[in-house]
Amino acid sequence: MTLWLWLGPIAAGIVLLVLLAVTSGRHYRQRLRLQRQVHLLQQHVHQANEASAFVESINQSFIHQAPTAMLLVDENSKLTFANPAAERRFHLSPVHIGLPLIQVVRDHDLDQLVRRVLHGLAPAEAIEIRPPGQDLVLRASAQRIGGQAPRGVAIVVEDLTELHRLEAVRREFVANVSHELRTPLATVKAMVETLQLDGLADIPHALRYLADINREIDHLATLVHDLLDLSRIESGRLELQPRWIDLRRVVEETVDKLVPRCREAGLAISCGSSAEAVLVMADPTRTQQIVQNLVDNAMKFTPPGGTVAVSIDAADSQARVTVRDSGVGIPEEDQPRIFERFYKVDKGRARQDNPGTGLGLAIVKHLVSAMGGEVGVQSSLGRGSSFFFTLPLVRGRIETLEPLEEVVA
């Protein structure tokens, strides 16, 4: 009995120790699990901070390197931030931070836009700005920051000048094409209506009308062909086929084909070269087109009895082809624009039997540029014109490649 009195407390103590050990182990495991979770949470927070810093660096880099002007103003319409593009656009410096927007940009329309957005008349708005004394078109967009309790306005100013210029070019191009198509179509329609009424009874009269209709249709076909050519060239879809050619031979063969047309127009045409062979890397078909367009242009502005002279020269690293005429010449103020599409100096100066499309010289400029050359003009009123183009000259071709007679011309 006495033994049990001694063993009872001991057993109870052992049980208590076991319970304490089990409880401590459970707490220890829970503590380890909690520590692991805290560690994982710390890793996630660290990764999130790194991602946030990375995004912030990208945003800062984008804002500072963006070509668009970006401004921030506070709720009092005072400037708080301007990126480098805005500093260049509005000639700003750090001393302007904190000043009222109207004092900084000096544009009433932009200041009124910001005030409307700040006062809640619209959460966002955009206007077009044309600064006085400058050939610029700007688009300013303003966005309120802070919702119902605005903390400021973000402003983005974009330069739309080039877009407006391209749109004006497009409208001018459409108008020119419409005019060039409408004129011959109206002529053809009038002649057909005349023939339908009473022209068929007079055979010689009808034949003249048919010849005129045929000429107008040829003009339309040439215009459409030139438009397609110019479209392919300007869009980069025209694939040139450059190869080694004797430029002298290509030019001479092209001129030979044009001799009958020149004689019919009452013009004398000649072709000469100061070199036996002028070797270049070029597309032979397009080179012929360049020469033909230049000769066509000379014929258009040279009255009967005049001359057209084509020459080929080689000097230094350039081959040069010049087309001179004894025509009416080009005013000096018009010469810088002479290679623009549809640009015509004066319709009254052109021969009525060779009106042209107004695209030939533009095509010449694009083709020569695509083959690495340059174009130019020298002219005086009443003394004719000299159009020329150059192409890079190839040295050593005769010695290193096939005989000249086998070179494609």
Image: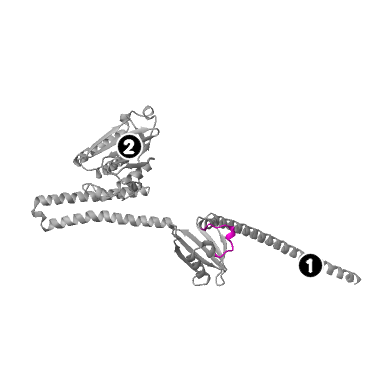
Tell whether 167 sits left or right of 52: left
Q: Main secondary structure of the magenta part?
A: loop
Q: Nearer the viewer, residue 333 or 148?
A: 333
Q: Nearer the viewer, residue 182 or 34?
A: 182
Secondary structure under the numbered disc 1 in the rendered image: helix
User: In this view, which residue lies farthest toward the top?
Assistant: 399
Q: Amino acid at mark 1?
A: Leu
Q: Residues within 10 Å of mark 2 (few under 14, many from 20)?
A: many
Tell whether 179 sits left or right of 169: left
Give the residues in magenta: 90-100
Q: Residue shown at 12%/50% (left/top)?
A: 207
Q: Amino acid at mark 2?
A: Val
**In the rendered image, the vertical position of residue 246 relative to residue 377, given as above or below:** above
Quick one: quadrant of the C terminus? top left
The quarter holding residue 372 reads: top left
Q: Nearer the viewer, residue 383 or 20?
A: 383
Disc 1 to disc 2, how far (Cα)? Answer: 108 Å
Sequence-first tag of 1 and 2: 1
Q: Residue shown at 21%/51% (left/top)?
A: 216
User: In this view, which residue lies farthest toward the right?
Assistant: 2
Residue 209's tag is none
Q: Which residue is mark 1?
A: 19
**In the rendered image, the vertical position of residue 11 relative to residue 364, given as above or below:** below
Q: Which residue is mark 2?
A: 321
The quarter holding residue 163 reads: bottom left
Secondary structure under the numbered disc 2 in the rendered image: strand
Labels in figure, total: 2
Where is residue 385? Give x, y as percent: 30, 41
Do callouts 1 and 2 mark residues in contact (Cβ within 8 Å)? no
